[in-house]
Image (cartoon, rainbow, N blue to C red):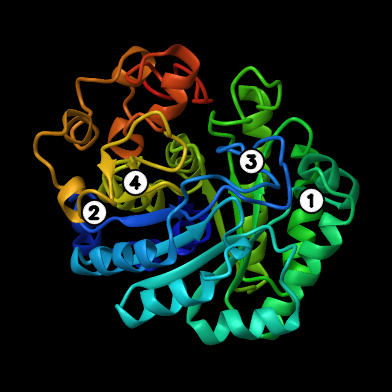
């Protein structure tokens, strides 16, 4: 995840050297927890193919409480409660409260369909620090991509309820061929609805969002979309609007932002590059972990095919710090393992080869170059 706004505002807004060192330590990661695959929607790009049904074997409330206690023991700083839609679980607010009691920051990622005014207040009271509501464009496009007539209106109402409840609220948008043209609408929504954060994600190949689905932007289309996101983030800053514009799903964005800044302000560009190098690029298996609905631990939420163990059998901290796990060791020291263009890229220190899950999904080789890198050979120093 790359905060474009904070980098554009100036290095003082970025991550400190101390935080950066911790970020790459591989210890105490942020955990994306897919509590359930149940969801009222059936999005065409869903990375874990969630749907409107129950899924056998999902963690019980008691098991989930025990996992939270283990995450607290391991000093995990934050849990992103996700799904499916975590609000389909009757115990979600109790799990959030347990996290807060244990000193873990709680974030909620939801489709928003079930959030009314009272629910937003209860989410606030439970101690959620941020709510991200997924919207993929205006009414027609969103409802088509998400498989429910009226999904847009429900999600928009949820955003308004969350803002009114005093929750830090964001919109989550996954870019594809079908909705890249909706970016102007989305930025207008951010401004008109008083939403504090806009998260714009590239498609990471997984679940229904595979590389052969025809949904992913090509490299030229990606550049147009990212240019627009960067430009609008700059406009918000110039207008004095406190909006955090964030991109995710492609660590090439950091290198691209640096290259664009270098053209207009070389001094600032070098300071931004230094921050990006401290950040270290892709965080899968390093400062980002995933627990799925069955308790399996993965490098990130997109890499379901790779599990390090199950939290019902071993504590999370033991799994995450296991020196015998070769993939974890490799992810934390990727230099020399990645192949193709990534192996020769002059920006490896700020990208780290981006998403290995996408490389493996597309090529069956986890160390192949990331096919979604949209930078030219000249831009990466080949």
Measure how far apart labels 1 and 3 are at the Cα level.
Answer: 12 Å
Mark 3, residue position:
227
| Picture quarter with the C terminus | top left
Q: Residue furthest front?
A: 56
Near mark 1 (Cα within 10 A), the count class, few <14, some 14-19 or many ≥20, is some
- Of labels 3 and 2, earlier in sequence is 3
Measure how far apart labels 3 and 2 are at the Cα level.
Answer: 39 Å
- Asked if residue 35 lies left or right of residue 144, the reply is left
Measure how far apart labels 3 and 4 are at the Cα level.
Answer: 18 Å
- Of labels 1 and 3, earlier in sequence is 1
**Which SS class for mark 2?**
helix
CB atoms of marks 1 and 2 within 8 Å: no
Between marks 1 and 3 in the image, the one whose residue lies nearer the viewer: 1
Q: Residue at x 20, y 47 (%)?
A: 320
**Which SS class for mark 4?**
helix
Say which quarter of the image contains residue 195. bottom right
Near mark 4 (Cα within 10 A), the count class, few <14, some 14-19 or many ≥20, is many
In this rendering, the answer to whether 198 lies above or below 121 is: above
Measure how far apart labels 4 and 2 are at the Cα level.
Answer: 33 Å
Residue 76 visible, this orientation: no
Mark 1, residue position:
184
Task: Give how far across and how far down residue 337 sits, in percent.
Answer: 23, 20
Q: Residue at x 57, y 31 (%)?
A: 207
Mark 4, residue position:
273
Mark 2, residue position:
316
Say which quarter of the image contains residue 251. top left
- Asked if residue 275 lies left or right of residue 53, the reply is left
- Asked if residue 280 lies left or right of residue 107, the reply is left
In this rendering, the answer to whether 202 lies above or below 142 is: above
Residue 321 visible, this orientation: yes
Q: Nearer the viewer, residue 66 or 162?
A: 66
Q: Residue at x 71, y 47 (%)?
A: 52
């Amino acid at each position: 995840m790359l905060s474009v706004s904070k980098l554009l505002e100036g290095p003082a807004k970025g991550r400190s050297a101390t935080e950066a060192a911790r970020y790459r330590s591989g210890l105490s990661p942020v955990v994306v927890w897919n509590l359930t695959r149940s969801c009222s929607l059936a999005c065409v790009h869903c990375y874990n193919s969630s749907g409107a049904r129950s899924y056998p074997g999902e963690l019980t409330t008691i098991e989930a409480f025990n996992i939270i206690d283990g995450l607290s023991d391991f000093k995990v700083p934050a849990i992103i409660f996700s799904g499916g839609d975590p609000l389909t679980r009757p115990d979600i607010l109790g799990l959030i409260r347990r996290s807060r009691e244990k000193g873990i920051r709680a974030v909620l990622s939801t489709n928003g369909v079930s959030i009314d005014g009272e629910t937003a207040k209860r989410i606030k009271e439970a101690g959620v620090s941020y709510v991200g509501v997924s919207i993929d464009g205006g009414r027609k496009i969103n409802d088509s991509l998400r498989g429910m007539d009226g999904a847009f209106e429900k999600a928009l109402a949820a955003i308004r309820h969350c803002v009114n409840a005093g929750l830090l609220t964001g919109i989550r948008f996954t870019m594809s061929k079908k909705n890249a043209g909706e970016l102007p609408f989305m930025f207008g929504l951010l401004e008109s609805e008083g939403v504090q954060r806009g998260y714009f994600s590239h498609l990471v190949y997984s679940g229904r969002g595979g590389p052969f689905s025809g949904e992913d932007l090509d490299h030229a289309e990606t550049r147009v979309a990212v240019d627009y996101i960067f430009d609008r983030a700059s406009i918000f800053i110039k207008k004095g609007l406190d909006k955090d514009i964030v991109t995710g799903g492609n660590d090439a964005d950091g290198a691209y932002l640096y290259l664009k800044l270098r053209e207009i302000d070389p001094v600032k560009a070098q300071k931004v590059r230094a921050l990006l190098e401290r950040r270290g690029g892709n965080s899968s298996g390093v400062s980002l972990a995933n627990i799925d609905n069955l308790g399996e631990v993965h490098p990130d939420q997109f890499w379901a095919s790779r599990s390090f163990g199950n939290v019902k059998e071993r504590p999370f901290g033991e799994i995450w710090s296991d020196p015998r796990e070769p993939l974890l060791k490799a992810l934390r020291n990727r230099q020399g393992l990645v192949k193709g263009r990534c192996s020769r890229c002059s920006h490896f220190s700020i990208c780290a080869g981006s998403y290995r899950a996408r490389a493996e999904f597309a090529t069956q080789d986890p160390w192949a170059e990331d096919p979604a890198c949209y930078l030219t050979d000249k831009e990466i120093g080949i």
